[in-house]
Image (cartoon, grey):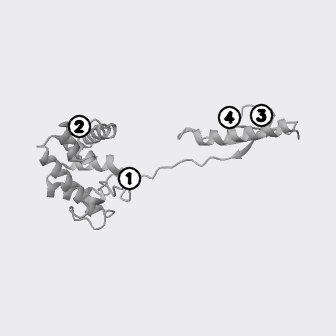
Amino acid sequence: MDRSRIKFIVITIFYVIIRLFTAGLTAHADIYRYIDENGVMHFTNTPTSSTQNFKLFLREKPKTTPHYSTKKYDDIIANASQQYDVSFPLLKAIIKAESDFDPRAVSKKGAKGLMQIMPENFKPLGIKDPFDPSQNIHAGARYFKQMYDRFKGKLSLSLAAYNAGPTAVERYKTVPPYEETEEYVKRVLKFYYNYKNL
């Protein structure tokens, strides 16, 4: 096999690897291989010609996202809602936005559990196990209520403070101009509206 053919094969394999890493998350990208009469390998994720006898070379494993029940913690949410005087649909919306009901969720910044409580708040909020759903939801509800009272019942500001911290909200006197926080407030309000209207 001459050098140009080897180079072509190496480039082709490299191309396949790049395609695997850049394939869309929802696209199914099995890779097929065909070896022509000159011994050159051809790869594709969309074989079109049956005469070339493409054969499966690499099967992509479909990506799965764990699905967590949205009703599993309703009793705890209802209890926390009553105890801290925070709307049940609102608490549920915060949990949906924070962790999508994953009790073991851990953010890049280290926030933990269903309501994504930061470690520095564990002690003030009485959390011993941030992954315990009851402790986490009650602590999150308590903390949100503190923000709600601090910002005189202004929901958007209270949500922004829950996400970005009260100091940032007080500095800007509005939802801080952080893309993450702005999107967070919109998402919670959307979920809140949906849960209220179930």
Residue kind at label 3, given as amino acid type: Ser
How packed mark 3 is, by other alpha carbons closer than 10 Å (few <14, some 14-19, many 20 or more), is few
The residue mark sitting in front, 2 or 3, is: 2
Q: CA distance from mark 1 to mark 3?
A: 48 Å
The spot of residue 155 in percent (x, y) is: 18, 41
Question: Could you tell which of marks 1 and 3 lies nearer the N-terminus?
Answer: 3
The spot of residue 144 in percent (x, y) is: 20, 51
**Between 7 and 191, which is closer to the camera in this rendering?**
7
Above or below, 93 relative to 118 = above
Numbered-mark total: 4
SS at circle 1: loop
How packed mark 4 is, by other alpha carbons closer than 10 Å (few <14, some 14-19, many 20 or more), is few
Residue on which the image places disc 1: 107
Tell me the residue at 83%/35% (across/down).
4
Are discs 4 and 3 less than 8 Å apart at CB? Answer: no
Q: Which quadrant would residue 134 be assigned to in this image?
A: bottom left
Instruction: Name the image quarter holding the C terminus.
Output: top left
Q: CA distance from mark 4 to mark 2?
A: 47 Å
Residue on which the image places disc 2: 175
SS at circle 4: loop
Residue kind at label 4, given as amino acid type: Thr
Residue on which the image places disc 3: 50
In this view, the residue farthest toward the bottom is 128
Residue on which the image places disc 4: 46
